[in-house]
Image (tube, rainbow, N blue to C red):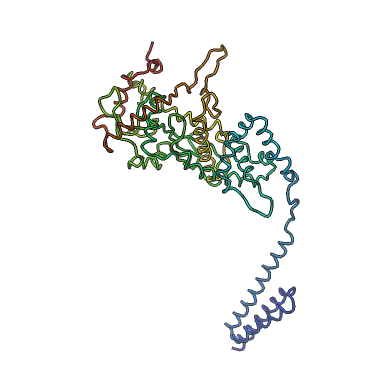
Amino acid sequence: MDVFCLVGVIGGGVSFFIFLFYRMEEPAQHKKLLLLNLLRKRRRLGYLSDGLVRTKRLALCYAILHLYKKKNHVRNQVRRQRRWWVRPVFADHDTHGAWVSLIPTMRDTDRDLYYNFMRMTPECFDRLLALIMPFIRKYSWRKPIPPGERLAITLRYLASGDSQTSLSFLFRVSNQAISKIVLETTSVIWSVLKKTVFPKLDRDLWLKTAAEFEVMWNIPHCLGAVDGKQVYIKAFPHSGSRWFGYKKRHCMTFMGVSNAKHQFIIVESGASGKRSDANIFHRSNFASKLIHGQLNIPPSCPVSGLTENLPFFFVGDNAYPKSGNFAVPFKGMSLKDEEMVYNYRLSRARRVVENAFGILCARFRIMFRPIEGSPSLVRSIILCCLALHNMHLQDEESVPPAARKYKPFKYADFYREDRSVVYGRWRNEDPNAEKSLFHQLVKQSSSLPKQQSAKGLDLQEMLVRYFVIKSVPWQWEKANLLL
């Protein structure tokens, strides 16, 4: 027992001296308190072997704790000092930045250049800024970036597709601030505009859309054109091949439903590029609501030329299912003449959504370039562009077609090199005919029961017979059926 006590005393003494060695820099009062605490522990535990072991552990813990504090103290002293509080190139932000020098000059002297820079008129910019200002205003003891400049940075980023570094040189704002501004502002624009620019899915909306398709694109009871669009992205870290699409590039896919005037009614965003259009559709909220009858689609109505009631339907390519509310083209090469005409008339209506994607990408050039950022940033950018696209088209509904700025290629009349005139698509718009057809459809749908569909007749067969009976003069030539 004495031998064990002697070994314990020697071990405890060694640990005690180690503890004193690491506490040399502590004030004398702190040393006394720590020593008294350690002695009380030893006296309370006694000189037995287990008590001495616990005493040694206590001393080693104190020594390790002191080492940890000493390393942190040295690390804080060695930390590199900042070269500048603000970089010299950003110091003249209030005098030479684009928000205080370039943009006011364009707004006062050259409105066309301002529209090209912002993709919107000054009046539209002010209205949008008034909507989102309460959500993007910042309060700080340093002078914050004003809300108008935050919106201008975001719109220029979407319109040009330039890197955030080039925008930092243009606006004299740091690259880190540009990254945060784009993410916050695009999210706010989508959350504010989505309730106003995307209409409520009710029966009147579908009847109005069907009237527009019949007047402008010669297809009855069409509720919208459906298709998917891939947006190129820079590969996300540690994502593998999840976002790698069939075009051999990393991309994010979104699905849209467009009306006859290139406005999006429904959008589904955020799917990986590895998934096909059919997979995205079957797993979307749009498909779920369509299957369970939650879209408030009107019942079947009669059309001139058919004895049966024609159901309301969407048009899409062969990636989408053939059903009572979806019209898809015939497959194969050896088709009948009527089926070839059907494919042409269907593609004539379906290309509306592809034109909508083209207008969207032409106006917001960020969609043409690989977007670099997190999945949430890419998704927020896509949804923000879709909301701005609908907002511009809604603003121009009351503007004469010749004075519209946000319009697609060949929308207005233009001249060839031989000075011959090519009439634009705006000449097909007939608001009076659309209104009268809309009221007619409302009257017909209200007189029918809510659940009514064609029985024993295929939607494709009904449309084939309708396109033959109600033919347009050029359909046989476009279907390559004229010698």
Q: Nearer the viewer, residue 341 or 431?
A: 431
Above or below 285: residue 35: below
Image side of residue 341 versus residue 5, left or right: left
Q: Which is more toward the observer, 467 or 450?
A: 450
**Residue 322 lies in quadrant:** top left
Q: Residue furthest bottom?
A: 2
Q: Quadrant of the N terminus?
A: bottom right
* Residue located 38% across and 34% down the image: 206
View extreme (left): residue: 456
Left or right relative to 174: residue 441:
left
Residue 244 locus on image (x, y percent): 50, 39
232 relative to 294 in the view: left or right: right
Tally the marks.
0
Q: Residue at x 51, y 16 (%)?
A: 422
Q: Looking at the picture, does residue 156 appear above or below residue 352?
A: below
- Taking depth in this image into account, of 370 and 199 the one nearest to the observer is 199
Question: Horizontal and vertical percent for residue 282?
Answer: 38, 40
The answer to which of 19 and 223 lies nearer the viewer is: 223
Question: Which of the 4 image quadrants contains residue 2?
Answer: bottom right
Residue 15: x and y in percent read: 67, 78
Image quarter hosting the C terminus: top left
**Residue 266 image position (x, y, % from top left):** 43, 38
